[in-house]
């Protein structure tokens, strides 16, 4: 039996899902095939994903493919309650509501594990690590897993290295049609969306610090620059820092950037990016937000101890007054601002990410017997198929190699 906040929200959720279906042509083409071929018949899929309207399109597609689907949210603040209610009506076993406590978060994941999944579909790795640690009795049935995000893939590679991984995992994040689009353009747009919905501040003319210059953070930097901000990037990787410099950004350590920042968005995937020592130097009025997977990039606890006053100014915006009177603003408790204060990435980009998820589930079903307990990428032919359908849906056509060009590319004899 599903557990959601309010089943009567289902009609609003259904409309959102319908809207999304219109904007996710790749996934919908997979659904059409699934409705005829039922490739996932007999499988139970347990998912721990952000419960959004886009995820709903994926879960309905997996069900159309014949799978029994159980799902929990992958972040305490990202569940869209109307969508969860609609999914419960659609026959998905769903355990998610916005604002779960830490205990409830894991209770929901345990409900998914109780469903006895054959395939686990993760975003951040919490479902898989739960089965590997507290629910080991359910491990033998799992034939494989998929992982949506950079942070989760890093965790699984660490598990593989430790010899702790007990089944193969497909790193969906590492498909070109995932990270080049979702991480960059998705995070770029949705993080700015969250910032604006929470604060409604002007971006033009602001000093905007982006922590990190991976695929997600460079998306945020690019969009902030496009809206007229003066963007500073902080990095620890010299190659990435150099890229940021040559892309036209100022690059400096956070200790210097924090004194100049009007807005900071962290997107590094590591912890302790904004620490007590940074808060001590922070500019009055600075807005702090995180768009990395976990809420450990900004040390909100340190802010709580340094602050003499705390006030909720607007939904998702808390004002802290420091001892010397400086005010700072923390968005969405330091959790994923794009999902907690907005609706996450737009459907057009999740279309490709979730097409990869559906293909990954099928891939595991067909190849599990030959896969080791390792992290794999989907073969590149899936990227090509997804990009081809996406381009077609956008009305974009491209050239094809002539046979002479193909032959030229496979010879080393032609030169100057
Ligand atoms: N991650 C980022 N945006 C998302 C969305 N809209 N749905 C599910 N997961 C997401």
Image: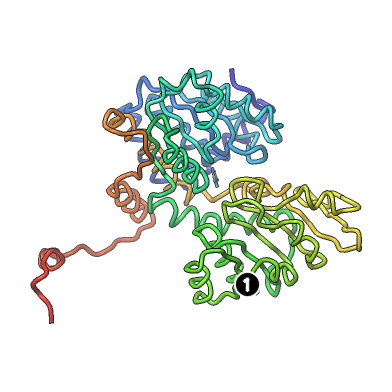
> 108 or 14: which is nearer to us?
108
Farthest-out residue, left: 413
- Tell me which residue sits at (55%, 50%) in the image: 345
Q: Quadrant of the C terminus?
A: bottom left
Binning the other alpha carbons within 10 Å of mark 1 as few (below 14), some (14 to 19) or many (20 upward) gives some
Q: For this view, does 370 lie left or right of residue 172? A: left
Does 56 sit above or below residue 405? above
* Apparent side of residue 371 relative to residue 140 in the rendered image (left or right): left
Q: Decide which of 229, 302 is in the foreground and name it.
A: 302
Q: How is the image coloured?
A: rainbow
Image quarter for ligand 1 equals: top right
- Which SS class for mark 1? loop
In the picture shown, does residue 339 fall above or below 370?
A: below
Q: Position of residue 373 (x, y in %)?
A: 36, 33
| Residue at 49% across, 59% down | 215
Q: Provide the residue designation for mark 1.
A: 252
Q: Is 323 or 171 nearer to us in this picture?
A: 323
């Amino acid at each position: 039996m599903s557990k959601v906040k309010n089943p009567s929200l289902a009609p609003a959720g259904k409309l959102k899902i319908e809207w999304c279906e219109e904007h996710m042509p790749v996934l919908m083409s997979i659904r059409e095939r699934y409705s005829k071929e039922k490739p996932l018949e007999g499988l139970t899929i347990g998912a721990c994903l952000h419960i959004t309207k886009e995820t709903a399109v994926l879960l309905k597609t997996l069900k159309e493919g014949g799978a029994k689907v159980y799902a929990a949210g992958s972040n305490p603040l990202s569940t869209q309650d109307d969508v969860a209610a609609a999914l419960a009506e659609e026959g998905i076993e769903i355990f998610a509501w916005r604002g779960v406590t830490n205990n409830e978060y894991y209770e929901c994941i345990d409900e998914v594990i109780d469903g006895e999944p054959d395939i686990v579909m993760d975003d951040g790795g919490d479902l898989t690590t739960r089965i590997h640690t507290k629910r080991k009795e359910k491990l033998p049935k799992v034939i494989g897993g998929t992982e949506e995000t950079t942070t989760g893939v890093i965790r699984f590679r660490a598990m593989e290295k430790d010899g702790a991984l007990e089944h193969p995992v497909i790193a969906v994040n590492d498909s070109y049609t995932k990270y080049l689009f979702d991480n960059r353009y998705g995070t770029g747009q949705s993080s700015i969306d969250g910032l604006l919905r929470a604060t409604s501040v002007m971006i033009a003319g602001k000093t905007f610090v982006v922590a990190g210059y991976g695929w997600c953070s460079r998306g945020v930097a690019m969009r902030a620059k496009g809206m007229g901000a003066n963007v500073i990037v902080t990095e620890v990787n010299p190659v990435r820092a150099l890229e940021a410099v040559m892309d036209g950004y100022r690059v400096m350590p956070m200790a210097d950037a924090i004194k100049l920042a009007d807005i900071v968005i962290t997107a590094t995937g590591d912890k302790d990016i904004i620490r007590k020592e940074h808060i001590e130097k922070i500019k009055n009025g600075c807005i702090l937000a995180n768009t990395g997977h976990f809420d450990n990039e900004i040390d909100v606890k340190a802010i709580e101890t340094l602050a003499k006053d705390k006030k909720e100014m607007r939904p998702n915006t808390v004002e802290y007054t420091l001892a010397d009177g400086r005010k700072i603003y923390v968005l969405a408790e330091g959790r994923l601002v794009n999902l907690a204060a907005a609706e996450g990435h737009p459907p057009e980009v999740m279309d490709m990410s979730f097409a990869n998820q559906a293909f990954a589930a099928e891939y595991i079903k067909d190849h599990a017997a030959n896969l080791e307990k390792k992290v794999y990428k989907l073969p590149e032919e899936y990227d090509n198929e997804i990009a081809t359908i996406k381009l077609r849906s956008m009305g974009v056509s491209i050239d094809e190699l002539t046979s002479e060009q193909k032959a030229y590319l496979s010879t080393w004899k032609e030169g100057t």
